[in-house]
Amino acid sequence: MIFGRVTRGDGAAVPGAALTLCDLSGDQLDRAAADEGGHYQLVPPTGGTYLVICASSTHQPQASLVAVADRPLRHDVGLAGGGATLGGTVGVRHAVGTNGAGTGLSGWGDVVLTLTDVRGTVVAVTRSGPEGGYRFADLTEGSYTLTAAAPRLAPVAETVRVPAEGHVAHDVALATRTQLSGTVRSAGAGRPVAEALATLVSEDGHVVGSRVTGEDGSFRFDDVAHGVYTITASGYAPVASEIEIGPGHPSDVVLSLVPPAVDTPAGAEPPPRPDAPRGDDGAAAGNGFGGRHGQHEEASSEPRSPSGGERR
């Protein structure tokens, strides 16, 4: 008979641990479960060398070779890992104090937190509570990747080291995102500019995205992280403006494009403004030339002399 006790690193019993007795060819000979005190018994058919396998859902498994003679043999099993917990608060950072020094964390509820091991296997999934608190229990020792994701929040993935036992406190800070919308207008008449290109550039010079304005000159950027950006618009001459996105800052901007200056020869009519009204045939209306709505001289059937008078 093989008997003993299953414990963890601090000497506490591991009740419910499963013990399996196998011969060296891998055939199962006996099975047992540790009682509340961690005690177990296995009965081999005869003397010899056997494999004792101990497994627990909360600890790393262990296998040992045990040589059995004609008398009971005590074989205690110590399991590593298990009993470790990981928890903390997931939320959005904000400034604290009257002088703005330091940062705090405002808890965010219903955030999905996923824990994966080094092989990429999902170990556990949980959701944060109303105050942003979360907790994983019965973790084995090792490195894990903790991922947090929620609507309107940028997902975050962080590496967490979990010891064999004890509690690991780990807060997760997420960045909120804002929808930025705006309109591109001409600087002169203030009319919307369609098909202009609006580009959003981060403070470090990376292009976050570009949008082509609609017929009403509008554009929109979805899910923009808080921070300082430069937004540009091009259609006439490009314009640029620095904006800051986040709590307490506007989420709507208006960019004005200035039409390019055109050199006009002396005595010639200036070209129409891009936003000037036009006639049915596309020509500028009210300029006295061209277009069905322009004014025309009546044609005369009599030829005229070079001086402009009629022939006699």
Image (cartoon, rainbow, N blue to C red):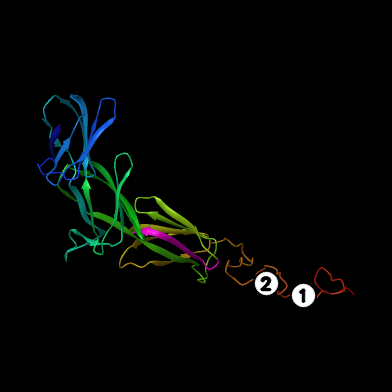
x and y, in percent, of residue 259 in the image: 53, 63
Q: Residues within 10 Å of mark 2 (few under 14, many from 20)?
A: some
Name which residue type carries label 2: Gly
In the image, which residues are magenta? Answer: 215-225
Amino acid identity at mark 1 = Glu
Which image quadrant: the C terminus? bottom right
Residue at position x 67%, y 72% in the image? 279
Looking at this rendering, what residue extends furthest in the left direction? 11
Using the rendered image of the protein, determine whether residue 63 is visible from the camera's viewpoint.
yes
Residue 279's label in the rendered image is 2
Tell me residue 260's x, y (percent). Answer: 53, 61
**SS under mark 1:** loop
State the mark number for residue 297. 1
At 20% across and 24% down in the image, what residue appears? Answer: 49
Q: How many marks overall?
A: 2
Left or right for 274, reference 73: right
From what the image shows, is residue 263 above or below residue 21? below
Instruction: Place residue 111 in its image quadrant.
Output: bottom left
